[in-house]
Image (spheres, rainbow, N blue to C red):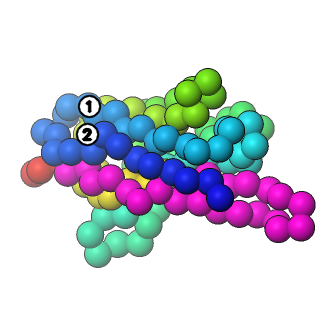
Amino acid sequence: QVRLVESGGGLVQPGRSLRLSCSISASMHSLNTMGWYRQAPGKERELVGSLTVGGGTNFADSVKGRFIISTDYAKNTMSLQMNSLKPEDTAIYFCNVDQLLAGQGRLVYWGQGTQVTVPS
């Protein structure tokens, strides 16, 4: 089983930046896709951004141009750099990866989440 642990959340003033990290227990070469999701109070979990199999990126319109995903295969980590933060970015942020295995299909893994709060 792949284990994911997020870190770096906190309270940040509007307009400032914050960097989240995700520690991944498995070799990142064994993974299919990787990305970040978030869930705001009273709302459904939504995609923030992801890295595709083809090597591209996919970001939600609400964060496009402000957030950046980076990876470090040597350290088995994935980061989310969040810039120009807004109150509407307040949410629990989750690290997400999936894996394709013969006889098991697509396996999806989630971290426990880390809270990001941007006050109004």
User: Which mark identifies residue 37?
Assistant: none
Quadrant of the image containing the N terminus: bottom right
Where residue 67 appears, as percent x and y from the top left, is: 41, 36
The magenta stretch is: 96-117
Q: Is residue 38 above or below residue 72?
A: below
Q: Secondary structure at mark 1?
A: loop
Q: Amino acid at mark 2?
A: Leu
* Horizontal relation, residue 62 to residue 95: left or right: left
Of residues 89 and 35, the one drawn nearer to the viewer in this rendering: 35
Q: Does the rendering let one see residue 58?
A: no
Distance of label 1 from label 2 (alpha carbons): 6 Å
Badge 2 crowding class, 10 Å Cα cut-off, few under 14, some 14 to 19, many 20 or more, is many
Image point (52%, 36%), residue name: 78
In primary-sequence order, the first of circles 1 and 2 is: 1
Q: Residue at x 31, y 64 (%)?
A: 40
What amino acid is at disc 1?
Ser
Residue 113 counted in the magenta span: yes
Residue placed furthest toward the left: 120
Q: Residue at label 2? A: 85
- Is the Cβ of the residue at disc 1 closer than 8 Å to that at disc 2? yes
User: Residue 59 location in percent, x, y?
Assistant: 52, 45
| SS under mark 2 | loop
Residue extending farthest bottom: 42
Label 1 sits on residue: 17
Q: Nearer the viewer, residue 112 or 49?
A: 112
Identify the residue at horizontal 53%, vertical 34% (top origin).
77
Look at the picture and state if 55 lies above or below 38: above
Residue 53 is left or right of residue 74, and the answer is right
